[in-house]
Image (cartoon, rainbow, N blue to C red):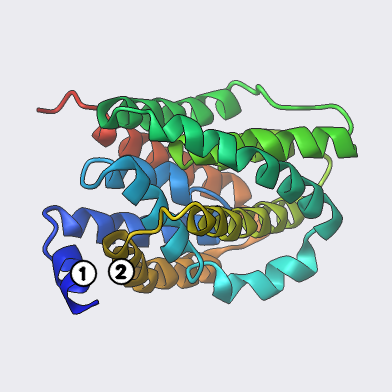
Amino acid sequence: MTAALADAASIPGLWLLVAGAFVSGCVRGFAGFGTALIFVPLAGQVVPPLWVLIILVTMDLAGPLPNLPRALRAGDMAEVAWLSFGAVLAIPLGLMVLAQMDPMIFRILVSVMALLVPVLLLVGLRYQAALNRPVLLGTGAASGFLGGVVGIPGPPVILLYMAGTHGPAVIHANTMVFLFIFDVLLLGILALQGQLHAQPLWLGVAMMLPATLGNLLGGWLFNPAYVRLYRAVAYTIIVAAALSGLPIWG
């Protein structure tokens, strides 16, 4: 255990993981999403793809906890349940694809995905029909697959809710709770598959502190009256993280 912890602490670029954990936690605290969209492109520059997922889901178990009680009261947990059911069915398929993926392709895909989400939201490409059970199940499955492949489960759910009839507080709560459940599901599936390694686990534990501090700050800043401002800030940070992750800077 001591050796694994020492090896984890000696990884070059550790500061980038710490910064990514704090900033992504802050954005999730005030926007309800953004952890993976920000952290994964940054972490992909430092550690292998599977490690990125392990670090992400481990640190993310603690980060949202301060804000979960409020989210559970404000959200629609029936919708979250259907989203989660879809996710658990599709995560293993995504992990199968990830296992065959080259790390450079991983970096490109996560950066492109992170760039694509703000663009789709800004141009108004969102789901606008009824939120029935098949739609929620399919959206959860899409999120589970994307989360397993590139560690970014949020886009399908974000696109689903942004044009819906729910108010900002419900959207914020549903998204936050679902993404927390996704982290639990992914970590459990990785454990069942025997893919949880000591070094990334310790890194994930270490990243809990900056992620939690970021979530606390973001949750303190959150006010439904300023949801448009929060989204604009979140999109800007997401784009910056995605651009930094593209392998074009040497």
Instruction: Determine whether, in the image, residue 71 is placed left or right of residue 118.
Output: right
Q: Which badge, 1 or 2, comes first in the chain's sequence?
A: 1
Q: Name the element at disc 1.
A: helix
**Residue 131 showing in the rendered view:** no
Tell me if mark 1 has few (under 14), some (14-19) or many (20+) residues whose alpha carbon lies within 10 angstroms of its own: some
Q: Position of residue 10 (x, y in %)?
A: 11, 63
Q: Residue at x 40, y 55 (%)?
A: 54
Q: Nearer the viewer, residue 60 or 227?
A: 60
Tell me if mark 2 has few (under 14), some (14-19) or many (20+) residues whose alpha carbon lies within 10 angstroms of its own: many
Q: Position of residue 38 (x, y in %)?
A: 39, 45
Q: Residue at x 41, y 49 (%)?
A: 53
Q: Position of residue 20 (x, y in %)?
A: 32, 54
Instruction: Determine whether, in the image, residue 106 is placed left or right of residue 117.
Output: left
Instruction: Determine whether, in the image, residue 250 is placed left or right of residue 200.
Output: left
Relative height, residue 118 to residue 216 (above, below): above
Q: Residue at x 31, y 25 (%)?
A: 105
Pointer 2: what residue?
202
Pointer 1: what residue?
4
Q: Looking at the image, do the residues carrying marks 1 and 2 touch, with CB atoms under 8 Å apart? A: yes
For badge 1, the amino acid type reads Ala
**Residue 219 showing in the rendered view:** yes
Q: Name the element at disc 2.
A: helix
Query: For residue 69, which quarter of the picture?
Result: bottom right
Compute the Cα span from label 1 to label 2: 7 Å
Q: Quadrant of the C terminus?
A: top left
Relative height, residue 165 to residue 121 (above, below): below
Q: Nearer the viewer, residue 114 or 167?
A: 114
Instruction: Determine whether, in the image, residue 211 is placed left or right of residue 248.
Output: right
Q: Nearer the viewer, residue 161 or 198?
A: 198
Q: Residue at x 29, y 27 (%)?
A: 102
For badge 2, the amino acid type reads Trp
